[in-house]
Image (tube, grey):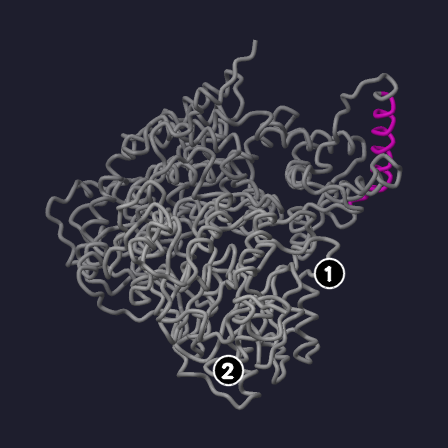
Amino acid sequence: MQTTQWQNRSVGDFKYHVGLSSLTQVATRDDRVCVLNILGGESSEVTPVSHAYSGGNVVFGTAPGKGGAVLPTPIGDIPVYNNVRDGLAAGHRFNCGVVYLPPSAARDGVAELIRVNPDLRKIFIITEKISVHDAREIRAMGQQHGIDIFGANGLGVADSWNQVRIGGALGGDKPGDSLRAGSIAIFSNSGGFSTTIAQYLRMAGWGTTTVISSGKDVYIHYAAPEFAFALANDARSKAAVLYCEPGGYYELDAKFTKPVVACVVGRWKSKLTRAVGHAGAMAGGTDDAQAKERWFMDKFGVDAIFTPDKPVFSAKGALVTNIAHIPAALTAVMRANATLPDFAPEGNLALKAWFGSDEGLDLPEDMRLPVVQAVAPYNEQIALLNQQIGGVVPRQSMKDASGASQMDAKTQVSSLHGTSMLEAAMLPFESNVALALVHDAGGQNDRKLIAPAVAAYVNLHGRPELAAAQASREAGNAPNAVLAAAAAIVGPKRQEAARSALSFMIERFHAAGLGMEFGASLSESFDITQVDTAGLPALTTDQPDPRAQALLAGVQTRGGRSVFLRWLSNLPGHPTEAAVLAAISATLAWGPLSRKRISLATAESFPWWLQLFGTLIGASADAARHEPERFCGITTADMLGKASLGEIGFAALLGRAPGKGDLFAFETLIGLLLTNGPGAISAQGAKGAVSADGPEQPERVQLNKALMGFLTHTGYAHGGNGYEGIAYLCEQFRGTELADPSAPDPGVDVHALAATAVARYAEYKSRKKTSGSLDIAKLPGVNHPIFKDKPVNLDPREVFIAKVFAERGESNVFHAFYKELVQQLFDAGVSRNVYCVNIDAVIAALLLKMLWKPLQSGEIGERELETAAFTIFLYPRMLGCAAEIDDHLNRGRNMDTRSPASQCQFVA
């Protein structure tokens, strides 16, 4: 029988041609390479690195129509010819071909290499998505002519001992950083992970021999069986790491004689009904990830996957499903073979704690970042950066985007500066003011400063803000329009002096060396005489300023501390109101400024915000409640020195002091309603106002006008809709003689009330359906478009609030009614499952709990009830939209909220 030349070259007992007997032959220093499509986008970047790393192994490349060109590399130019025949005619010789051609041209490129070059021995195909038909023909050509083919859809091969790379980008731009000579061979279906695994091994003290990126097309031309045979004959390689993806039976047929760590990934692909990414197993196959896991467990004689917590392995090998576990598994397997790592570990790639800034964090010593001197020129740049006051963020279009708020689409829980509304619901009013201004809830001292600073602007007796608000109120406007009228008066000139003083204080205290450490702004030891007072603005007067004195007294009574107030009090004369407000603002801003958490523009706006918050709370109360030294029955001294913002806000809303339970419910509502993300209509109004003013010149943005944008974008459908739930509850409890909705035994049969409500609603739905109408009103506070379709549905926000109040031992008969209602709707067959009680029901139940007694006593009527329900929404959303305004001012671009004309529609 006649044998062909390639059959004489074939090795092993394979039924097909395999020409490489050892991994030492995969990539050698004697190999010479021709690259097809060498000037292509990927090849022109990768080939120069391979060429230089390998000592100049690429003899020429091809690029049709570009003959005569060259590809520059660090060690000299590579000539380019129109085709392979021209390169050979020029005297170049090669035994390896690399294919970077498009999928449709790959087969013809392989054919050209084989047809014109009898010296060809190896082909490396980088091209991905080659058709099955072409892959079969490539396979046949290689077998017919005795050529070893690697790929397709691979990154080629590399040899760490020989320092040779052929094909793709194994090892990245600096192969030597990952490919350190050692004793471990790598065979990987993933090109990118080939390098990653080599780097993981190096960190653990293991170097590599040969690294093969096999690719993962349907045909893997040089597959696991060929690799196992070559591994057995490579004296350098003591073990191997395999990275395997679903699809194909190559690994099942491989016969390993050396230890192996196999990483099998892609369990999720078994659920697919079509191929995704690398060609892999799909639903119904027996070559999915779990099947491959079983193959390797059988080969290794183990019964489980290796994990650091449960290290299952044998001397034959270990199976892992996470590449991060490969080094530990390999070390364990090799220890069982009495083999130590190739060299001392160089570190590890485990996730480590990283801090943008550890300022103010009390960290363990081993986590504390050491302070070191950077090398030039970075040391100079860092020095300049340290002189910068506050943070700076890049500008971008902020349409439908926010750096302040977001909503979790799954839980529907919004957050503001990283604090969820459920967390905010547990905070006092002052902390939520801090959250809006300084981006966190602040501390006890912050609350002692915020409360009097805001309260100082609540009593509007004799001020134009109150006159404007009252005129709007008497004209029949809704609460949002009433507050907008007051906000219009609080323009930039109203606190211009305070903002100027604040700017001076920040600049001079920074220059004087006030530290950036936690609590620096409260320091009792800082030498205030170091502060340069040259060019001092008018911070004091010869005569005492009553409003300034009252504000200072309030801070002192509350025990508030401030190095800025201490400095101000030591200046000659008497501090002005603007100076006191500036000193409080500087104290609040100093820590966040030092940590670059807020910008200087944000800090300098604090006096304006504090005045606006106080003004809008005050404007929500009728003019009759504003007296010379008293607001809603609270004296000025008590407002500034004793009352919390929650108590003041409650009094403004209802005209009376809250009970303990009322105050907690009120502040819970404040936290819950802070934000609904940047997509809320109210936030869109605020952001649009900033965009129109032009945030790229932040000094031109009018904060009061931006708040008016928020106010004009609230209404009876957005903000006042809480009244619908209250009205529904009032209807259900009418005639029950309920006295105290918070009593553990309110004396009301909630079960019977719910049954009556369900019967009425069932009759209503039946009547509507009989008449052929599909316009069936929904029950307010029941069901939710996200939390549905389960046997029993729950709104996680409602669950959280219910748990909090249960732990406090507080009852709410209205909330209990809603819980009974959704159960009976299901029991009566009105709903196909148990609806959730949504967050709107919680808000309505909390509000009505506070308002029930004055409603029953006749102190308030339906109109006042609706106004209160609307206003309780405006208080917290004022804070949330202030955060959106500040965020857009710092990040946004001029007119960035407009919609392009192409996205707009005309409706005839």
Q: Is residue 279 magenta?
A: no
Q: Residue furthest top?
A: 908
Q: Is residue 85 above or below residue 765?
A: below
For label 2, count other residues whose C-alpha is less than 10 Å away and answer few (under 14), some (14-19) or many (20+). Answer: many
**Badge 2 vs badge 1, beta-carbon distance below 8 Å:** no
Amino acid type, callout 1: Thr
Q: Position of residue 422 (x, y in %)?
A: 58, 49
- Report the disc number at residue 286: 1
Q: Residue furthest left?
A: 534
Residue picked out by circle 2: 238
Of callouts 2 and 1, which one flags the residue occurring earlier in the amino acid sequence? 2
Q: Is residue 740 visible?
A: no
- Looking at the image, which is closer to me, 516 or 86? 86
Q: Position of residue 411 (x, y in %)?
A: 62, 47
Q: How many marks?
A: 2
Left or right side of 606 for 320 = right
Q: Position of residue 235 (x, y in %)?
A: 48, 83
Residue 761 in which image quadrant? top right
Amino acid type, callout 2: Lys
For label 1, count other residues whose C-alpha is less than 10 Å away and answer few (under 14), some (14-19) or many (20+). Answer: some
Residue 655 in which image quadrant? top right
- Looking at the image, which is closer to me, 679 or 31? 31
Quadrant of the image for the C terminus?
top right
- Looking at the image, which is closer to me, 144 or 132? 144
Q: Which residues are magenta?
A: 746-767
Type of secondary structure dominating the magenta stretch: helix
**Looking at the image, which residue is at 49% across and 63% down?**
213
